[in-house]
Amino acid sequence: MENGLDSTQRVRAILSFVQAADAGSFAAAGRVLGVTSAAVSKNVASLEKALGVRLMNRTTRTLKLTEEGSAFLRQARVALDALDTAIDTVSAQRAAPSGRVRISTSVAFGQEHLMPVLPQLLSRYPALSVDVDFDDRVVDLVREGYDVVIRGGNIPDSALIARPIFHLNRVLVASPDYLAHHGVPRAPHELRAHRVIARRFLSGQISPWSFKAEDGSLTTFDPSDTAVLTLSAPESLVRAACDSAGIAQVGVHLAWAHLRSGALKVVLHRQHQPGNYEMVLQYPHRALLAPRVQATLDYLQEAFAKDERLHIPLNALRAYAA
């Protein structure tokens, strides 16, 4: 930074800015920091002058972040977390991982795959505590204060680190009862005559179905054209297929138990493309990772690697084809 802010002044100014943004006023930020409202205001003004941009618009009652202020706040949180982590790391050299780890995951994956492995994590690290939010929306990991997020889909490039857990292969399924009444489709174009169940992402996008022709070309089918049901929760599609509502595209890991029990059959196995989705552990890019987070990440990756339901080979599905 220019304009005469030394390192001590920078830290003081950034702390004032972050606290003001969180608290909603200079006075409230001053109470947290143990300084006057005027001192907080002066620190934020110095920071804005050094950066050459306005970070906050002030009124007599409120503070509102500018677009530049929101971007700087995200980066400032990462920097402050890094300082906290440096302290945690030094302290942890004398003790086992301890403290709280906040995790965000989807309802289906969290209940079926995360919950069964958490008791062993807590047994391995008795000083650890875990706070899990089951939420299918995409969360802002840094802004909302999560340490680890478990996400599935086409994972975009970002400032977050992503550790792969498994390939989220998809499969077309229907119940034996549905197929007995409506017939078994033998080619993708026959799906237009069937009752299909569509998956709608929270963004509003309908998940397409992809197929590979004999000449190697790829085609897609939009299930929304003929869908009798459109659902957002992945596990609800499995339930609807088991209840003979129609043909659905679901994750292999969600369908596996129902395929083995005979409640579902695989449809168009040879032509259907499983996609390139994956499930990952995501966490902020930090030079130093808190031991409590590092231990949790390592344990979860190890535990999920042993979960056979997440690693079903595609050729194993042939045995359950209609």
Image (cartoon, rainbow, N blue to C red):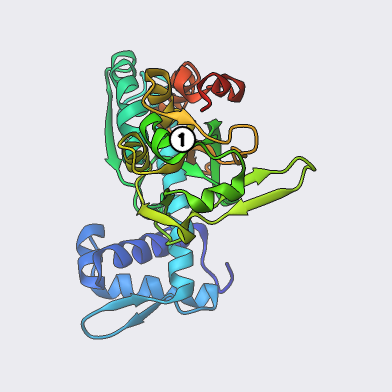
How many marks on residues?
Answer: 1
Q: Give SS at disc 1.
A: strand
Picture quadrant where residue 63 is located:
bottom left
The quarter of the picture where the N terminus appears is bottom right
Reply above or below: 142 against 290: below
Q: Position of residue 136 (x, y in %)?
A: 35, 47
Tell me the kind of residue under disc 1: Val
Picture quadrant where residue 174 is located:
top left
Q: Position of residue 71 (x, y in %)?
A: 48, 66
Foreground residue, 125 or 26? 125
Q: 10 Å neighbourhood of mark 1: few (<14), some, or many (≥20)?
A: many
Reply above or below: 174 against 60: above
Q: Residue at the far bottom: name it.
A: 60
| Residue depicted at 44% across the width and 42% down the height | 247
Left or right: 95, with 33 as reference point: right
Foreground residue, 285 or 42? 285
Left or right: 279, with 234 as reference point: right
| Residue depicted at 28% across the width and 18% down the height | 119
For disc 1, the marked residue is: 173
Residue 6 makes an appearance in the image: yes
Foreground residue, 257 or 174? 174
| Residue depicted at 47% across the width and 38% down the height | 183
Q: Position of residue 152 (x, y in %)?
A: 48, 41
Q: Residue at the far right: name it.
A: 215
| Residue depicted at 21% across the width and 82% down the height | 61
Residue 8 makes an appearance in the image: no
Reply above or below: 248 against 7: above
